Every structure is written in C-alpha cells, then in structure tokens.
C-alpha cells in the first residue's frame, strides 16, 4: 500500500525536499500527525536513571554500570566476536558483541570510560553482558525511565524518541470529555490526557512498573477510556447516519417465493432459523438499509436463511448478490442455491448467476449480461461480484459470507453498487465464528445481530482427540478402518511446500505418504495454488464418494458439506488458530455416522508446546460449543487477530482490553450519546484525535 499523504498545516511547496529514511519510516508506522506521535506509546522501559556497582549486582539483573575499558580483542572461536573488559572499580565485566563495527571498537578503546546497560550473567569466565547498550560516560543521569518504542527498519530509537516528544509538545491535548461525562467515571482515578501521555512517555523512576506493564495505572485508564469512547462515538454516528439513508422496501406477497422455497425444502427449519428469518424479513420491509450480522455455529443452517432473504428481495422485484471469500465456498453455496431456487426462478424467467475470477471470457460475458439485464435474480461468487464491470439492474440485498475474511474496502464496494440511485442495498453479513458479547458491544455496535443458537436435528456430536505426532501409525490404522466401512476422511496440512523455518510436513508429501499407505484407493490433493477447474474436479470426486481420502490445506475450512465424511485429521494442529480448528472440525459430523476429529500435534525438538498452542488444543478437546470456543479465542488472541485486523482498514483497539476493561466499555456506551447530543463539537474533536478521518472503515 502506498504511504498515506502527510497531514500538514499547509500544503507542502512543490519543491519540497525528499523525505529522509527515518521520515519515510514514520509514515510507514502511520505517524503523520503530532497526535499520532503522541499516541505512539512505549513497548517497555529501560532504567538508565541510576548506576549499579558490579559487586552489588546479582546474576540475571538488568543494570547500568560505568567504568574504564581495560582490554579489547576480536576473538574467532566459537565465532567472530568483540570482547571488551570493563572495570568499574568494584569488579570486572566482559562485554560481548557478535555484531560490531569499527565505530564500536573506537567507542570502546582501551582507556575510554563508558556506560553499559544490559543483563548481567555470571559463569566460569566471570561476569558478562551480551550486546549491552553502550554510551560515553559522564553527564547527568536521566530523570525518567527511557522508553523503548515499537519501530521499523530505518527508524532508530533516539530519532523516534525525539519525534514523539516533538509530537507530544505540538499535539492538541485539550479536554474533549464534558464534565458530566467525566463525573460518570465514578471512583476511577482518571488523569487528564496531557498528564497521562507525558507520564507514559517519561515515567519517573519511582513509577510502579507492574502498573505500567498490566496497564492498570491511572494514565493507562485515561487512554483506554478515550479510545473506547472514540470507537463508540464512531459506531453511534454510523448507526444514526444509516437511519437517514434509504434502501428498497422489500416485502414478499403471501404465497410468494419464500413460502414456495419452504414448501420445496426436504427438511423443516429449526425454531432458531425461523426466528432469525423473521427478524431479517422485518428489516427488509423497512426504508432504512438493513445492517445485520447473522451468526451461528458451524452447520447451524445459515445458508437457507440467506436463501429465504434472497427470495424476499427477488419477490419484490430486486436482485440479490451473495459473496464468499473462496471459490470453493462460493461453489458450495452456488450448488445449494441452484438446487433450491433454480426451478422456482425458472418459472419466473430468471436464473442464478455465477461470477468468479477464473471464468472463461465467453461465460463471464454471458453472466455479466444476465446481471445487467436483471435476468440473474441471484448472483453468487467471490470478490469478482464487486468488480467495476459488474453492473446490477436492481441490487436490493447483498449477502457476505464469512464477513471477517473480507477487507473493509471490499464490503464498502459491495454496498456502493446502488450509489447511482441514491439508495444502498440491504446488507446481511454471515459468520460461523460467533462473536463474543464484549466484542459485539465494541466492534459491532452499529450492527443488529441475529443468532442461530441451535443445530438442525441429525447432526452427530464430533469426538475430539489430541494425538502426538509419534503415534502417526495409529492414525493411519484409524483411516483404514473408516475406509473399510465406506466412510470418507479429510487430512488437513498447514503448508503446501516445505519450509526450512517451520519444518512441517507439506500437503504434497502427505498425499504421497497416504497414497503409498492405501494402495488401490483414490487419494485426493487440494490446495490454493491449483487451477480452479482442477479444484472443482477434486471436490466433485470427493463429494460423490468416489474418493475416500482428501489431503488438503485450509481451503476446505468453510462451506464444504460431505455428510459421508466422518473423520478429520488436522496435522500440526498446534499451528492453527482456535476458530480455524473449530471450522475444520465442523466439516465432519454432518451425517448419521459417529464422527471424530484427530488433532495431530508435534512439540519442538526436545521441547514443549507453547502456552498459546496448549490453550488452543485444550479448548478444542473440552468443548464443541462455538460460542465458548469464540470466548476462549478472544481471550487467547485478543480482538485484533480475532476480527482479522490486517484487513480492517483502520487500527483496532490498541490500548483497551475487552475482557479486562468491560466496565470502561459500558461507560463509553453510555457516554457516547451524551457527548454527541449535548457537546457535538467536543465529539467531533475527540473523533478527529483518535480516528483522523478513518471512521468510514469502522462503519463497513
């Protein structure tokens, strides 16, 4: 992505000098305004306010010492390194550097007095420091802890510290919280913003580091409160703005398409499906654009609810678009929807269209024409649905599946397909990753949420087993037994090609291994780099039952529905996210046969699984409830990763923690309407400070 343009007090002259490397690095970090710099907080702190005598230091302490260099040499065993002996009058310490330059040797020449700060280690060779921070001795000691900031290549800490302090001095940090809003904070020891930021950038040596690290200090509380309030203000503005927008009024007549679809389905809807279908129908009948999230666990039946919503739109004379993140998922939706709706639409002279990036030119031109003419009442596809050349005759409803997998700009593009008519389509977003309540309160405050909280009858509980990688042979025997019973098996691998860094078995190697282990059986291979036609052919063979085992990467994570598949093996399960593991497990247990999910894990050579990996695997073994899985996933990963922060288009919460700071979130929800209604100018300044024009992304 190109760097964001600089925000300056006046336009830069045309003959402005090119940016230096550190200036470009600042832009890369998004630090273009004084307030951005002021809000760029330290990762940690170093205490350079005092000197410690070597004789008084303990093994493992991080200390700053001052003394004279008594010896310097370059050693070559076991590898090239610079060794410097430092004597502070009480003891001697060896400073060891594996990366060094002539300037370092000059700075630490014999006879020079220097200050060195680092972790002190004892041993047979005496006291040592590995790669300490070194500067010339003399001068007053700092009066505050030294901040260490998040940075990028080309942006050294000294430059960044000066830039942050300059930003802190120049930024407008005047009060934006009205007195009555502050009064509602109750007993929280809230500092003002300028005092809070000044303290966090330069805390005094007597500051309680534990309070800084766990973010419970009053200065941190102020920042978290302001950040949450900005987010709630943005969401409230979005909701209110949506109330002034207009969308097509979509109602179905009695005996129309929705009722015809229900009569044609080979199954009955659950009570939860009927409830959310009615919620969606009520929204579609209003002039305001629907902005609803339909969430439900894996296999809860969201697609048929979306089909009913599409029927309402089509019955009212409008089109519906359904967009999925992968071609395999879009293909699954297309196959289901064609089966349910094609006969009903054919009677009306309409059809279901298919749009994807891999289509042949002739087929694509035919589909584009059908969409533009309105003959295609329902359009299913990948991101190809929102490309510029796709022109809808009358788009009334947009459905986005696995919405967290899409970038915000893509969601905005789909909503803008009706911009010419000063209307926008109703928007239904679907997710099989249930959103924990605190997350919904925060990030989806401008969304209405419908939840399918029961599974259709006939879904078989899936037994989950954790199996160490050295028991691989037992897993192969389990697969042999499943094949003998006429069942089918998924084997999911995390990589396509070998990686020296990760040393994981790849899908190709596993495919060869299983082909050798089960001679005479058709073993399939599926990964994202295969041509679309080849993917479709493999999936067709597996879906038909002709292929008993499918080795795949995570392209089968969502949407694949093969009721005869009863065993899921996930290799290197410790490498997967919790919601991803839950999605994969949901590919089995869709038929009457007893089903199992084997989480095959491998600890590092001679080591143990990391804490996060252990927590994930433990959660998978203990519960199959998607909402409980989502709650634990939020605890483990935090909101940014949970929502797909890289695609958000704007920073997610940087300072607040939705679990720990739930009371602050409740305060922000109460304070936002007060500030917006009674102090609109304060609200505007607050939003500009925290979001800087990025609010549109938070409303997508």
Image (tube, rainbow, N blue to C red):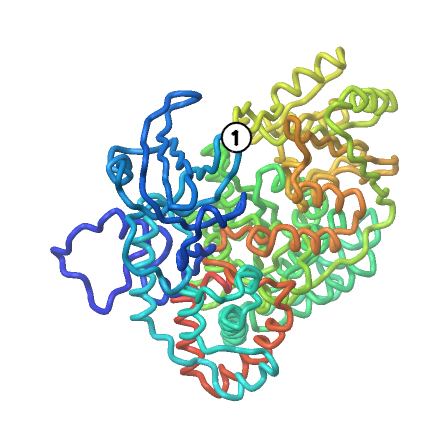
| Numbered circles on residues, count | 1
Q: Residue at x 42, y 39 (%)?
A: 93
Q: Is residue 179 or residue 414 the one in the foreground?
A: 179
Q: Is residue 82 or residue 153 the one in the foreground?
A: 82
Is residue 537 in sight in this rendering?
Answer: no
Q: Is residue 169 or residue 555 the one in the foreground?
A: 169
- Could you say whether the residue bearing mark 1 is in a helix, strand or loop? loop
From the viewer's perspective, tell me whether residue 175 is left or right of residue 513.
left
From the viewer's perspective, tell me whether residue 493 is left or right of residue 22.
right
Q: Residue furthest left?
A: 15
Q: Residue at x 53, y 25 (%)?
A: 499
Residue at image mark 1: 124
Mark 1: give few (<14), some (14-19) or many (20+) Cα within 10 Å. Answer: few
Q: Residue at x 82, y 20 (%)?
A: 477
Q: Is residue 118 above or below residue 254?
A: above
Is residue 262 in sight in this rendering?
Answer: yes
Q: Is residue 647 or residue 413 the one in the foreground?
A: 647
């Amino acid at each position: 992505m190109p760097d964001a343009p600089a925000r300056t007090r006046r336009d830069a002259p045309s003959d402005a000098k090119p940016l230096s490397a550190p200036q470009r690095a600042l832009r890369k970090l998004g630090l273009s305004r004084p307030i951005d710099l002021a809000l760029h907080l330290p990762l940690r702190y170093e205490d350079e306010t005092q000197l410690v005598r070597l004789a008084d230091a303990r093994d493992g302490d991080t200390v700053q010492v001052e003394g004279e260099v008594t010896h310097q040499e370059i050693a070559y065993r076991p590898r090239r390194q610079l060794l410097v002996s430092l004597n502070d009058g009480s003891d001697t310490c060896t400073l060891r550097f594996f990366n060094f330059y002539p300037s370092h040797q000059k700075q630490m020449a014999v006879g020079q007095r220097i200050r060195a700060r680092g972790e002190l280690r004892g041993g047979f060779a005496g006291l040592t420091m590995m790669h300490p921070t070194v500067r010339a001795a003399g001068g007053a000691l700092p009066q505050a802890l030294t901040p260490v900031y998040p940075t990028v290549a080309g942006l050294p800490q000294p430059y960044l510290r000066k830039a942050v302090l300059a930003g802190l001095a120049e930024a407008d940090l005047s009060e934006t919280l009205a007195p009555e809003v502050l009064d509602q904070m109750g007993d929280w020891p809230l500092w003002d913003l300028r005092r809070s930021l000044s303290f966090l950038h330069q805390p005094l040596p007597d500051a309680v580091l534990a309070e800084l690290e766990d973010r419970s200090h009053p200065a941190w509380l102020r920042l978290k409160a302001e950040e949450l309030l900005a987010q709630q203000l943005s969401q409230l503005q979005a909701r209110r703005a949506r109330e002034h927008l207009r969308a097509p009024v979509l109602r179905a007549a009695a005996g129309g398409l929705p009722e015809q679809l229900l009569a044609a389905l080979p199954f009955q809807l659950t009570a939860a499906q009927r409830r959310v279908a009615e919620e969606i129908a009520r929204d579609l009948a209003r002039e305001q654009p629907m902005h609803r999230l339909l969430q439900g666990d894996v296999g809860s039946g969201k697609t048929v609810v979306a089909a009913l919503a599409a029927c309402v739109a089509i019955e009212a004379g409008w089109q519906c678009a359904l967009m999925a993140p992968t071609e395999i998922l879009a293909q699954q939706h297309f196959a289901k929807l064609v089966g349910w709706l094609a006969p009903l639409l054919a009677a009306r002279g309409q059809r279901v269209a298919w749009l994807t990036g891999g289509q042949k030119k002739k087929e694509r031109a035919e589909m584009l024409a059908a969409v533009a003419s309105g003959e295609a009442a329902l359009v299913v596809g990948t991101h190809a649905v929102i490309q510029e050349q796709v022109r809808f005759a009358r788009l009334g409803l947009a459905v986005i599946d696995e919405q967290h997998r899409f970038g915000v700009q893509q969601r905005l593009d789909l909503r803008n397909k009706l911009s010419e008519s000063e209307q926008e389509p109703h928007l239904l977003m679907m997710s099989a990753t249930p959103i924990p309540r605190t997350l919904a309160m925060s990030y989806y405050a401008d969304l209405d949420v419908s939840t399918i909280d029961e599974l259709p009858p006939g879904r078989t509980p899936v037994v989950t087993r954790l199996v160490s990688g050295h028991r691989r042979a037992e897993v192969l025997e389990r697969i042999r037994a499943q094949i003998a019973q006429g069942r089918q098996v998924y084997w999911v691998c995390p990589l396509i090609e070998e990686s020296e860094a990760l040393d994981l078995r790849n899908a190709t190697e596993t495919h060869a291994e299983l082909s050798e282990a089960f001679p005479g059986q058709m073993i399939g291979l599926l990964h994202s780099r295969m041509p679309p036609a080849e993917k479709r052919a493999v999936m067709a063979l597996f879906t038909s039952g002709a292929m008993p085992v499918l080795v795949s990467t995570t392209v089968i994570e969502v949407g694949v529905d093969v009721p005869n598949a009863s065993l899921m093996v996930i290799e290197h399960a410790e490498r997967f996210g919790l919601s991803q593991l839950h999605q994969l497990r949901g590919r089995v247990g869709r038929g009457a046969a007893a089903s199992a999910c084997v989480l095959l894990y491998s600890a590092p050579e001679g080591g143990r699984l990391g804490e996060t990996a252990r927590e994930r695997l433990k959660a998978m073994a203990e519960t199959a409830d998607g909402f409980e899985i989502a709650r634990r996933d939020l605890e483990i990963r935090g909101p940014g990763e949970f929502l797909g922060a890289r695609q958000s288009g704007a920073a997610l919460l940087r300072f607040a923690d939705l679990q720990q700071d739930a009371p602050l979130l409740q305060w922000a929800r109460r304070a936002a309407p007060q500030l917006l209604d009674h102090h609109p100018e304060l609200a505007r300044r607050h939003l500009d400070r925290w979001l800087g024009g990025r609010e549109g992304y938070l409303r997508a």
